[in-house]
């Protein structure tokens, strides 16, 4: 299991490498879908950080706060440095899974991804305005397995 910051930096670098820049809002939704895919296909979480139900959908707070200075702009590669990738290297098998989810999710705008996640049970059951409740891993797994 990785840190969400390591996975996020990998996603950012991957997107920039292929000219598919990614904003913090879009990154948050892709991390949610990456976590869901790992829970279903690998029977374990991809990262250990919690996902919370915020106004604009699922958010990993540690990642959000690290990248919030970019606002709605594209996050540059190495924006948090090489530290995370060297301390917490992602296996080639896991990189393939992450890349598959990124390639699917990047086709949508950030607002479309917000709409998609708002219509899914894990966010709907967890969200309370102004509360930033944790979305339980079990709720994500059960929804995507079903």
Image (spheres, rainbow, N blue to C red):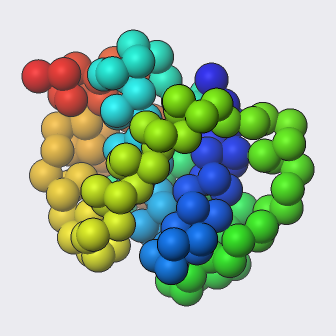
Residue furthest to the bottom in view is 73
Q: Residue at x 17, y 44 (%)?
A: 120
Say which quarter of the image contains residue 25.
bottom left
Residue furthest to the top in view is 43
Q: Visible in this render: residue 114?
A: no
Left or right of 95 in this view: 136: left
**Residue 38 place in picture, x, y as percent:** 41, 27
Residue 89 versus residue 130 in the image, above or below: above
Q: Residue at x 61, y 45 (%)?
A: 7
Q: Nearer the viewer, residue 123 or 43?
A: 43
Q: Quadrant of the N terminus?
A: top right
Left or right of 111 in this view: 76: right
**Residue 8 place in picture, x, y as percent:** 61, 53
Q: Residue at x 33, y 73 (%)?
A: 110
**Residue 105 place in picture, x, y as percent:** 31, 59
Q: Residue at x 46, y 16 (%)?
A: 44
Q: Visible in this render: residue 47?
A: yes
Say which quarter of the image contains residue 144.
top left
Residue 19 versus residue 81 in the image, above or below: below
Q: Quadrant of the C terminus?
A: top left
All told, the count of numbered labels is 0
Residue 52 versus residue 16 in the image, above or below: above
Residue 79 versus residue 132 in the image, above or below: below
Q: Nearer the viewer, residue 89 or 23?
A: 89
**Residue 54 place in picture, x, y as percent:** 40, 55
Left or right of 129 in this view: 108: left
């Amino acid at each position: 299991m990785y840190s969400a910051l390591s996975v996020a930096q990998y996603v950012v670098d991957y997107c920039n490498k292929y000219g598919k820049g990614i904003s913090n809002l879009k990154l948050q939704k892709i991390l949610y879908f990456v976590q869901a895919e790992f829970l279903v296909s690998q029977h374990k979480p991809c990262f250990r950080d919690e996902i919370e139900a915020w106004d604009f959908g699922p958010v990993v707070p540690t990642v959000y706060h690290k990248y919030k200075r970019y606002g709605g702009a594209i996050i540059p590669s190495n924006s948090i440095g090489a530290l995370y990738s060297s301390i917490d290297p992602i296996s080639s098998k896991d990189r393939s899974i992450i890349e598959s989810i990124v390639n699917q999710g990047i086709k949508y705008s950030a607002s479309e991804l917000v709409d998609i996640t708002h219509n899914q049970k894990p966010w709907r059951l967890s969200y309370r305005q102004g509360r930033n409740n944790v979305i339980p891993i079990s709720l994500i797994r059960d929804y995507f397995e079903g």
